[in-house]
C-alpha cells in the first residue's frame, strides 16, 4: 500500500518490517488530492524544474522524485526495506533501467537514506534481470517483480538478485481460467505450488535470493481468503495487503509452518541447476515461451503498470 496512515498504524504492531510501492500506489497517492500527497507532488515538480529545462526529462524526473518522496516517508514507519519501482516502460531497456535506478538511489542518499534500506523494483524480464545483475554488483539491491514462474525465479537467483516477488494469486487466476476449475485445495493451488518450488530450489542450490510471495486469492473460493498465505507459511517474507493482515490478526486458528529451509532443500525435485548454474538469454527466452502463464501474466502486468504510470505522467505534465 501507499497509504501512509495505514502503514503508520500497522507499523505500531511490530509485525511489519518492510513496505513496497508500485506504479499504482504512487499514482493513487499523486492523484489523491490529499494535502500530504499534494505536497509530495509539488516538491517533486519543483525539484525536477530545478534540474532540467527539458519538459520530457523533467516529467520523468518528477515521477521518480515522487516515488522517492513517498518511499522516504514510508521509511519513517518501517525498519526494513522500502521498494521503489523503475518506470515500467523501461522493462525492456536494460541500460536505461540501470541509469534510472542509480538516479533513484542517489536521490535517496542525498536525503540521508542509506541504499541498504531501498530495493529497486524491476520487472523480471530478461532486461530487468540483467539490469539487476549490474546494480547488485554496485551495492544497489533489487526486487524483481511480476514473477510468475520458475524460469524468472531461477534466472534472478543465478544473477544474485536480492529478492523476488512471485504473484501467487495471479498464477492461480491463470490456471483457474485455463483449466476451468474454480476450487482448489490450497496445497494444489498452482500459485502455491510455483512459489513452494521456487523456495525449495533456492534452498537446495544455496541461493541467497529472498522469495517474497505477493498477490493472494482464496484457493477454495470466497470465505477462504487466507488459503494461499497459510499454505506458504514459512516463506522467507511475504507482501500482504492491509485487509488480509487484519484477517490474520483476527484469526485464532493454529498456523502451521509449511516451508522450512532444510526440508525444503530435500524436497526440491530438481537434480541439478538449470542452465548449468547460469541460464543464458536463449534458454531463458525459450523456457519463458513454453510457460503460458508467465508469458501472458507478465505482459498483462507490465501493461497495467504502464497505464498507471501514464495517468500520473499526464497529471504531472500539466504542472510544467
Image (cartoon, helix red, strand yellow):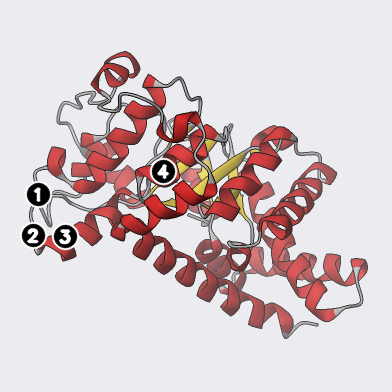
In the rendered structure, find residue 184 and report the number of the disc placed on it: 1
Residue at image coords 50%, 66%: 24
Marks 1/3 in contact by CB < 8 Å: the verdict is yes
Residue 209: image location, x then y, percent: 50, 31
Residue 176 position (above or below residue 272): below
In the rendered structure, find residue 176 and report the number of the disc placed on it: 3
Q: Which numbered mark, 4 or 3, is in the foreground of this view?
A: 3
Residue at image coords 64%, 55%: 70
Query: What residue is pinned by disc 4?
Result: 239
Earlier-in-chain disc, 4 versus 2: 2
Residue at image coords 61%, 46%: 130
Residue 208: image location, x then y, percent: 51, 25
Earlier-in-chain disc, 4 versus 3: 3
Earlier-in-chain disc, 1 versus 3: 3
Label 2 residue SS: loop
Residue 110 position (above or below residue 46): above
Marks 1/2 in contact by CB < 8 Å: the verdict is yes
Query: What residue is pinned by disc 2?
Result: 181
Label 3 residue SS: helix
Give the quarter of the figure containing the C terminus.
Answer: bottom right
Marks 2/3 in contact by CB < 8 Å: the verdict is yes
Mark 1 to mark 2 CA distance (whole Å): 7 Å
Amino acid at each position: 500500500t501507499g497509504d501512509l496512515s495505514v502503514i503508520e498504524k500497522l507499523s505500531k504492531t511490530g509485525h511489519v518490517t518492510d513496505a513496497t510501492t508500485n506504479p499504482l500506489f504512487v499514482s493513487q497517492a499523486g492523484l489523491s488530492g490529499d494535502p500530504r500527497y499534494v505536497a509530495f507532488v509539488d516538491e517533486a515538480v519543483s525539484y525536477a524544474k530545478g534540474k532540467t529545462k527539458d519538459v520530457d526529462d523533467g516529467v520523468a524526473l518528477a515521477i521518480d522524485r515522487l516515488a522517492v518522496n513517498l518511499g522516504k516517508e514510508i521509511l519513517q514507519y518501517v525498519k526494513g526495506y522500502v521498494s521503489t519501482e523503475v518506470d515500467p516502460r523501461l522493462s525492456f531497456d536494460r541500460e536505461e533501467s540501470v541509469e534510472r535506478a542509480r538516479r533513484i538511489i542517489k536521490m535517496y542518499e542525498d536525503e540521508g537514506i542509506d541504499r541498504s534500506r531501498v530495493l529497486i523494483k524491476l520487472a523480471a524480464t530478461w532486461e530487468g534481470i540483467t539490469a539487476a545483475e549490474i546494480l547488485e554488483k554496485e551495492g544497489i539491491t533489487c526486487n524483481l517483480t511480476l514473477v510468475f514462474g520458475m524460469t524468472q525465479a531461477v534466472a534472478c537467483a543465478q544473477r544474485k538478485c536480492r529478492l523476488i516477488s512471485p504473484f501467487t494469486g495471479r498464477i492461480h487466476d491463470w490456471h483457474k481460467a485455463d483449466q476451468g476449475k474454480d476450487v482448489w485445495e490450497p496445497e494444489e493451488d498452482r500459485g502455491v505450488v510455483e512459489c513452494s518450488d521456487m523456495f525449495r530450489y533456492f534452498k537446495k542450490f544455496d541461493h541467497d535470493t529472498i522469495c517474497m510471495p505477493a498477490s493472494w486469492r482464496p484457493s477454495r473460493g470466497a470465505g477462504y481468503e487466507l488459503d494461499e498465505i497459510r499454505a506458504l507459511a514459512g516463506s522467507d517474507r511475504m507482501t500482504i495487503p492491509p485487509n488480509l493482515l487484519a484477517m490474520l490478526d483476527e484469526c485464532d486458528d493454529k498456523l502451521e509452518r509449511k516451508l522450512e529451509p532444510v526440508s525444503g532443500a530435500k524436497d526440491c525435485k530438481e537434480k541439478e541447476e538449470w542452465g548449468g548454474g547460469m541460464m543464458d538469454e536463449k534458454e531463458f527466452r525459450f523456457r519463458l515461451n513454453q510457460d503460458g502463464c508467465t508469458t501472458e501474466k507478465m505482459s498483462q502486468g507490465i501493461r497495467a503498470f504502464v497505464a498507471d504510470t501514464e495517468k500520473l505522467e499526464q497529471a504531472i505534465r500539466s504542472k510544467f
